[in-house]
Image (cartoon, rainbow, N blue to C red):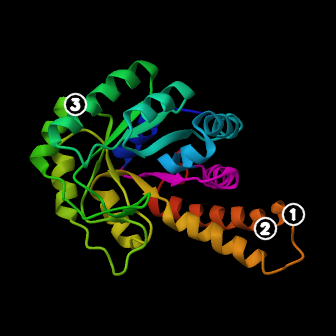
Amino acid sequence: MFVSSIGMIKKAREGRYAVPAFNAENMEMAQAIVEAAERAGSPVMIQTTMPTVKYIGEDLMVAMVRALAEHASVPVALHLDHCTSFDLVMRALRAGYTSVMFDGSKLPFEENARLTKAVVEAARPMGVTVEAELGAIGGKEDNVSSDVIYTKVEEAVEFVSLTDVDILAIAIGTAHGFYKGEPKLDFDRIDEIRRAVETPLVLHGGSGVPEESVKRAISLGMSKVNFATELRAAMTAAVRESLKDEGIIDPKKFMGPGRDAVIALCLDKIDMCGSAGKA
């Protein structure tokens, strides 16, 4: 089922679990994500960053994920992740993405709200979910580094009121990429923001966060959790291991193990999110 993400995320908010959102870089990763979701009976989101869309093309990505989703027994959404380009968001909407994120977190508050509202106004008549970010997730995303700027409760309330955004990514101490030490999450901030707004909340930078921390964040109100870096690392490690056999020249022989590694990792993350059996 190829669906918008808002229904699955609202259901997760009510049930106090989270929808796992996995970044895919190619066909094998997309196949692995859907296969894992089907095995676990979990709703799932496949995400693509701006560089991935540039590499594959939005039309081809939509066609590939739609084909997988239409043959799947679980709901699958295709999400444009961390898009800072208003034009690319519009292209993704026209191509058939079922969920988009306009990331104006590096813009002044008023400009972020204005552009996010414009995306909502364009996407809502099409039934497409809109995610935004307030504050700044730390670490490195698409070769751009940033420090954490924690989301303020009062600004979250105002932002949701101004934009009517569907889901909101908040900065609570996580970061993109792998962590050099254990991340220190502001759990009180999650609880305060969840109590202040009805909008489902998103945890970015899930790769490498200890399982107990992810589960606590979900119990306090995170309804979607993003995983990207760990999937890339798992696929690359498996492919690299396969290519130690210099006799292998068929891409199916080395990409297959990469796909299997991603399936295994996604199953672990689905279990962490508590979404198994919730499709």
Which mark is on residue 177? none
| Residue 48 position (above or below residue 5) | below
Residue 79 percent location from the top left of the image: 49, 41
Q: Quadrant of the C terminus?
A: top right
Q: Is residue 58 in sight in this rendering?
A: yes
Q: Is residue 261 left or right of residue 273?
A: right
- The CA span between labels 2 and 1 is 7 Å
For label 1, the residue is 250
Is 26 a magenta residue?
yes
The amino acid sitting under disc 1 is: Asp
The amino acid sitting under disc 3 is: Arg
Which residue corresponds to the image point at 43% horizontal and 37% vertical from the top-left?
A: 100
Residue 215 percent location from the top left of the image: 37, 64
The image quadrant that residue 173 belongs to is bottom left
- The CA span between labels 1 and 3 is 50 Å
Residue 246 percent location from the top left of the image: 85, 78
For label 2, the residue is 254
Is 252 a magenta residue?
no
The image quadrant that residue 166 belongs to is top left
Dot 3 or dot 2: first in sequence order is 3
SS for callout 3: helix
SS for callout 2: helix
Q: Is residue 49 in sight in this rendering?
A: no
Q: In the rendered structure, are the residues bearing label 1 and label 3 in contact, judged by CB atoms less than 8 Å apart?
A: no
